[in-house]
Image (cartoon, helix red, strand yellow):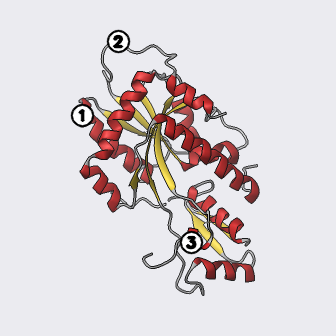
Amino acid sequence: MKRLIGSMLAITACTGAAHGAVPPGPYPQKSIRIIVPFAPQGPNDILARLVGQKLNETWGQQVIVDNRPGGGTVIGTELAARAPADGYTLLMVSTSTAVNPTLKRTLPYDTVRDFAPVIRLAETPNVLASHPSLPATNVAGLVKLAKAKPGEITYASGGVGTSTHLGGEMLAMMGGVKMTHVAYKGAAPGVPTIGETLPGFGANSWFGIFAPANTPREIVTRLNTEIARVLATPAVREQLALDGAEVIANTPEQFAEHFRSEIAKWGKVVELAGVRER
């Protein structure tokens, strides 16, 4: 497994209301699809496959990971939004899901209304690294250098709207500097964290699972309970820890609250940084 780098009341209501009919018999009775709106081998894909394998072992039903990259996660997310609310199609979500409502002018779905949070799986810290030739060895030195050379310091990220991109924009805003972003296609001991230099800074990558809105509460609860059990096993915790990830495994309601706060936080960064798509 590769290293993982890096009104919301409506959501809570969706997780608590069972508008859809519960399928007859115990759940699940057939294979489950987890749509991953990213290319294979990235952190979202790896985590989805890890969870899917364990659910397969427990339930005896195949869990299929369906990679649908493109459109800054919009293609796969729209596909999940239009799926039946029966618990057999799930969506792997991450920080990008909370960023897109502000970043993109239009979306073919409503991120709040069309999904029911199931569980926040894990989160990983992003890492700030520099070339040895850069005359700065910590965040304070970087901010000082960037102030002396406005716009001349460039930073790379895994793509527009990712937590690494907006984390860089947040650093620039909180440090009162101007840096130039360079987007790429994919996603240190003894060094102070950014938050130690700029109090209040926080730009972790997180990963979770959504289901289509109106998925029966019984199914959301079953998924949450079983996935939380999987994440609590020593083998899974150890694997994620080796890759720098911390298990979260919270309730649907807690995930809904977290998602609401992420939309607000990253929405402010997108607006102030002027990175909203035209």
What residue is shown with label 3? 196
Q: Is residue 252 left or right of residue 105?
A: left
The correct choice, above or below, for 240 with respect to 33 in the image is below
Q: Which of marks 2 and 3 precedes in the sequence?
A: 2
Q: Nearer the viewer, residue 29 or 140?
A: 140
SS class, disc 1:
helix
**Residue 163: horizontal and vertical position, in percent?**
57, 57
The correct choice, above or below, for 275 with respect to 73 in the image is below
At horizontal 54% and vertical 78% (from top left) the residue drawn is 130
Q: Nearer the viewer, residue 161 or 193?
A: 193
Q: Is residue 71 visible?
A: no
**Distance CA(mark 2)–CA(mark 1):** 20 Å
What residue is shown with label 1? 58
Q: Which of marks 1 and 3 precedes in the sequence?
A: 1
What's the residue type where badge 2 is placed? Pro
Which tag is nearer the camera, tag 3 or tag 2? 3
What's the residue type where badge 3 is placed? Glu
Q: Which of marks 1 and 2 precedes in the sequence?
A: 2
At horizontal 30% and vertical 56% (from top left) the residue drawn is 239
Question: Residue 152, located in which quarter of the rendered image?
Answer: bottom right
**Residue 272: horizontal and vertical position, in percent?**
75, 57
Q: Is residue 205 visible?
A: yes
SS class, disc 3:
helix
**Residue 56: horizontal and vertical position, in percent?**
27, 35
The correct choice, above or below, for 252 with respect to 140 in the image is above
**Distance CA(mark 3)–CA(mark 1):** 43 Å
Q: Is residue 41 left or right of residue 72?
A: left
**Residue 139: horizontal and vertical position, in percent?**
59, 77
At horizontal 51% and vertical 76% (from top left) the residue drawn is 192
What residue is shown with label 2? 24
